[in-house]
Amino acid sequence: MVALGYDTAGLFSNDDELARQIEESAKRSFEPVWRLPISDEHHEVIKSPYADLNNIGKYRYGGASQAAAFLERFVEGDTKWVHLDIAGPAGRPSAQKPDCANGNGFGAHLLIDYLMNY
């Protein structure tokens, strides 16, 4: 949210082509996304001495990437995946077409476009 503001969702993916398709759908649906990284650092900070992994990092910086690293641990094999972090749009104080205030509905148009076109 700090990096992308109220209008843009973070996009995380393990597949460049799938990410590109989602970005195209985002442009067509006027629901902007920006691809963000998941680095070794993000995988490292979710390790825990007490559990298999920790669902929060050791510090507040890179929280969206840390969350994506956490989710990535539940993806099996070579499954292609995308995570849209909608924290920014979810905090939007007023409606902005095509979505309502507080991000209600953000990503719905994007995902419908993706399903219809790919």
Image: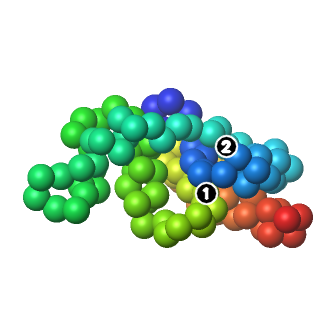
For marks 2 and 1, give the one nearer the viewer.
Answer: 1
Residue 102 locus on image (x, y percent):
54, 53
Please, what secondary structure does the residue beneath circle 2 have?
A: strand
Residue at 42%, 50% in the rendered image: 69
Residue 33 circle label = 2
Residue at 60%, 46% in the rendered image: 11
Give left or right: position of 27 versus 101. Answer: right
Question: Disc 1 residue type?
Answer: Val
Q: Which residue is mark 1?
A: 82
Question: Does 34 sit above or below residue 106?
Answer: above
Using the rendered image of the protein, determine whether residue 89 is visible from the camera's viewpoint: no
Q: Residues within 10 Å of mark 2 (few under 14, many from 20)?
A: many
Question: Disc 2 residue type?
Answer: Val
Residue at 16%, 62% in the rendered image: 51
Residue 110 locus on image (x, y percent):
75, 58
Residue 7 circle label = none
Q: Earlier in the sequence, mark 2 or mark 1?
A: 2
Give left or right: position of 72 versus 55. Answer: right
Q: Quadrant of the C terminus?
A: bottom right
Using the rendered image of the protein, determine whether residue 25 is visible from the camera's viewpoint: yes
What's the CA distance linking mark 2 and mark 1? Answer: 12 Å
Q: Nearer the viewer, residue 31 or 20?
A: 20
The structure's colour scheme is: rainbow
Residue 99 locus on image (x, y percent):
69, 55
Question: Does 59 sit above or below residue 87?
Answer: above
Residue at 56%, 38% in the rendered image: 36
Give left or right: position of 56 versus 109. Answer: left
Q: Nearer the viewer, residue 76 or 112?
A: 76
Q: Nearer the viewer, residue 111 or 31?
A: 111
